[in-house]
Amino acid sequence: MSESRITYRPDIDGLRTLAVLPVVLFHMKFDWIEGGFLGVDVFFVISGFLITSILVSDLHSGKFSLREFYKRRVRRILPALTFLNLCVLAFGYLYCFGFDVPEFASQAIASSFSYANIHFWLQAGDYWGKAAEEAPLLHCWSLSVEEQYYLFFPLLLWACWRYLRSFVAPIIAVLVACSLILFLVGMARFPTSAFYLLPTRAWEIGAGALLGLFQHYQIGQSRGVRFGPHAAFAGILVLLGIYLSMPNLAMGAILATLATCTLLQYGNTPGLVCDFLSSAPMRAIGKLSYSLYLWHWPIIVFAAYFGYVGTALSMIGTITLMVVMATISYWFVEKPFRSKDVPVSRVIVGFGAVAMLAVILKGYEPAYASGFEVPKWHSFGLKHAMKAGTEDLNPETEGVDRIDHNIPTDAYKTGGVILGDRSEPPSVVLLGDSHGIMFSKVVADIVDEVQVTAALNSMGGISPFFETEPSRSQVFSSLSSQQKWEYDMSRIGLIERHPRIVVVSRRWSLCCRDSDRSRKSKELATNCISWISKHCDLVLLIEQPPELAMPDRKLVHHLGYKEVVPVQNDLPLKMQAHDTKEYREGRKYIRQLAADIDNVSIVETTDLFQEHDAVIVAYGKKLDYMDDDHLSSRGAMKTKPRIKMAMARSLSVEARSDE
């Protein structure tokens, strides 16, 4: 049985419009639609409703066929997705930074084989983080959730229909409830996992499935004429409300699901809402919704990639390109391949060819001869040490010559990297994220010169701050709840031994973004520094060095890509500073901490590297930066005199005289 035998409802195309447009506007960073990404939840419910309605109709008529079902899914999903992947790979190979191409290929493989949600959960982590924002196929996570769902759901529905027909709806309702509970618990304890993964997202698709079953049995239909228009109007208001002012992700998803179910149930009853959703413009955009969803995000990402943002002209150009590519995709790819006249084998061949191209490009290794020396990076990072058996990096390929220091894999829970006499409490404790790792060699050299004991505790991607009574339920993409708790308890133990100095280095701009996550991070930092200051003589905050106006990539590769050569006679090479509001707020924030909290001082670094709106990144062939926001070990060493002078005030007389 084909989809065409299910009665066409124009209002559902209109509902698709109400799903896709908020997503597009949200991703274009319109502040007034802060809950726009919940349009994805609307799509989940619509999908569950339509697919279940088709399956139940087939089962009822005795025409159910798994083969035909999956053939329909292949025709519906793969052609437009394959076309998108081909275009992203081709564009990336021809015009983008070569070292980004293997990642584009990995994303294309993940989206093609329906595990993009797992890929981004493991690789990008936070959906709102920088790594996710730079991934052109990030949005395919939601397609993968749906396809994973439909690997299992038809078989479950068939088995229940055949053997437990009277219990089909109760069984699905129980599964939906379990998934919803897991989602709510997950959003509180492991939000990244709950956001991306099928078990915590299945309830939304399942809610649509339940509605499809209820409509098959005509449950609640008798009240449709009387109450339908009012219920539909309420559904529209709820959707608009959560789009414009989302309370939180969990509540937003629940309200989006309820509102969508209401509109699917009553949106076709005669009235104002039905007329609106069924209008020609709403139907036209709704028909384009799949292709528009596919194309909007890569175009936004690549526009930002090449700096085509921030102006009215760039916005108009981005929107125009979205519409053009979505229209091409719909009329020349999506719509023709839905026809049964096109053999599924042809779709599979095209899919296989693009997947093979992605596999080839995943192993692509570009060569950019920049003429600069590969910068060194002394790695005292605890997270890297935890990964036993990590292979050595190829400096030329990775863009950094990492020097490891044989850190024990359990150092994160046993006090960190201990320098000096382990039997003595440390005089100096370093807390940091990757910026703490950046200054670790500087601190290590200073404590060696003044002959005191130190404990280095820096972990890339993990905040240096912690609750003084840490929960055992914290989960990060790179640490388990047990590991995070052990790391927190280890750092608390160090501070409670009353070191003389606690040095704190982090990317302070991350505390100063306009988001709830950043505000909570800032509050945690303030409370933690206040607590630390009561347990030591001095808290020394190292200012974040200036950021560079370049993508998140290794500088030596970027300079080669841009065909920049070293300045002769060891003269300085300058690049544009990335002087963002967040960076300026970060500098202001640590100065406010030093003013408000006793025993807190800062070490300024900006003036060592920045002149007006330019940043000195190299002298001759030697680079002072490793990437857009990290100094190389050579660059970090330029801060050593200032850090040592600041530390000497709280260390021994010998340390002072050493200056």
Image (cartoon, rainbow, N blue to C red):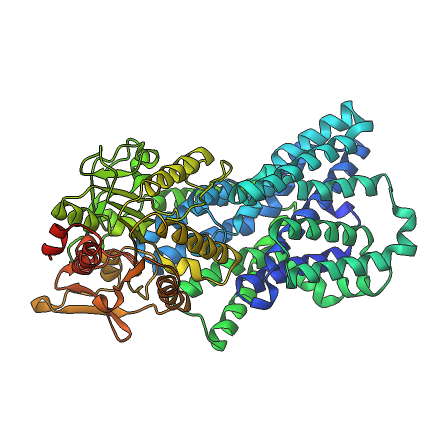
**Furthest residue in direction top, as rendered:** 163
Q: Residue at x 56, y 58 (%)?
A: 329
**Residue 211 drawn at (x, y percent):** 77, 43
Name the quadrant containing residue 164. Answer: top right
In the image, is 546 to the left or to the right of 274? left
In the image, is 623 to the left or to the right of 470? left
Quadrant (top left/top right/bottom left/bottom right) for the N terminus: top right
**Residue 15 drawn at (x, y percent):** 71, 57
Report whether residue 8 is seen.
Answer: no
186 up-or-down from 261: above or below: above
95 up-or-down from 310: above or below: above
Q: Residue at x 19, y 46 (%)?
A: 444
**Residue 60 drawn at (x, y percent):** 81, 34
Name the quadrant containing residue 62. Answer: top right
Q: Nearer the viewer, residue 68 or 445?
A: 445
Q: Residue at x 89, y 55 (%)?
A: 227
In the image, is 645 to the left or to the right of 586? left
Q: Nearer the viewer, residue 601 or 11?
A: 601
Q: Nearer the viewer, residue 264 or 329?
A: 264
620 up-or-down from 394: above or below: below
Report whether residue 491 is seen.
Answer: yes
Name the quadrant containing residue 486. Answer: top left
**Residue 260 drawn at (x, y percent):** 73, 52
Q: Nearer the viewer, residue 159 or 625?
A: 625
**Furthest residue in direction left, as rendered:** 569
Quadrant (top left/top right/bottom left/bottom right) for the C terminus: bottom left
313 up-or-down from 518: above or below: below
In the image, is 106 to the left or to the right of 644? right
Badge count = 0
